Image (tube, rainbow, N blue to C red):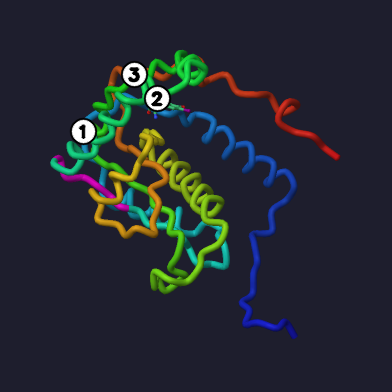
Amino acid sequence: MRPHQTLPYTLPDLTDAERIARATAMRERLATRRSCRYFADAPVPRQVIEHAILAAGSAPNGANHQPWHFAVISSPETRRAIREAAEAEERAFYAGKASDEWLDALKDLGTDADKPFLETAPWLIVVFAQRKGGIEEDGKTQNYYINESVGIACGLLLATLHEAGCATLTHTPSPMGFLRKICGRPEHEKPLMIVVTGLPAPDATVPAHAVRKKPLEQITSWL
Ligand code: IYR
């Protein structure tokens, strides 16, 4: 007897060839994801966003407290408010707060303080990490492995949106405290990132720099 309530767990009984084929296919589809900064203003169905958030909400996490909240913004007024606040922080960042080394690391990405995509893209998903709350969201119970949990959730969110044919951008204006106020979230929630999503603009480009990925030999050691 196991000392807790259990449910059976099974997975499809694949052959090794099928496992390899599925891993390859998934990897190849994920490899076409890019951070996109040029969005069309075309709509994307709300159901796409709902399914992507439910996928994010299935992430492994500390003690199954599911320490995340997704504030989904489509209203033009709120997108404008977020753009204005984000650009104010970014202007300070690019005009002096960032070190020369940091600005140098960004130069191949072509980013600057202008963030028009915050108004162009139809959906902004502001991801909050709940420092407290537990599964009942009581605002008091300690949560665990918060950044790890919400980071994995963001990965699943991005993967699902990509699979649905949506372009995405993880945007992290710093500091991000203003998002708590705009989204009406409590003090114990920490804004982690804005996931911008929609369709790519017809003339969208991505920085060539970002296409260079480290090879397997470099990112792996087999012990
Ligand atoms: N948050 C800024 C700067 C920035 C920082 C990193 I590290 C990036 O990979 C990209 C941008 C901005 O959004 O412009």
Q: Mark 1 points at which residue?
A: 84
Question: In the depicted view, which residue is nearer to us: 52 or 169?
Answer: 169
Instruction: Tell which quarter ligand 1 is in.
Output: top left
Categorize mark 3 by other alpha carbons within 10 Å: few (<14), some (14-19), many (20+).
Answer: few
Question: What residue would you read off at disc 3?
Answer: 95
Mark 2 and mark 1: span between their CA atoms?
A: 18 Å
Q: Where is residue 99 in the image (x, y as percent from the top left)?
A: 47, 20
Q: In this view, does 114 lie to the left or right of 56?
A: left
Q: Is mark 1 on a helix, strand or loop?
A: helix
Alpha carbon separation for disc pair 3 and 1: 16 Å
Residue located at (36% from left, 34% from top): 173
Above or below, comparing residue 117 to residue 81 in the picture = above
Residue 115 at x, y percent in the picture: 28, 27
Mark 3 and ligand 1: say if the CB distance to the nearest ligand atom is below 8 Å: no
The answer to whether marks 3 and 2 mark residues whose Cβ atoms lie closer than 8 Å is yes
Q: Mark 2 points at which residue?
A: 97
Sequence-first disc among 3 and 1: 1
The amino acid pointed to by label 3 is: Ala
Query: Which residue shows up at 37% across the image and 40% down it?
Result: 195
The structure residue drawn at horizontal position 47% and vertical position 71%, both measured from the top left corner, is 141
Magenta stretch in the rendered image: 71-76
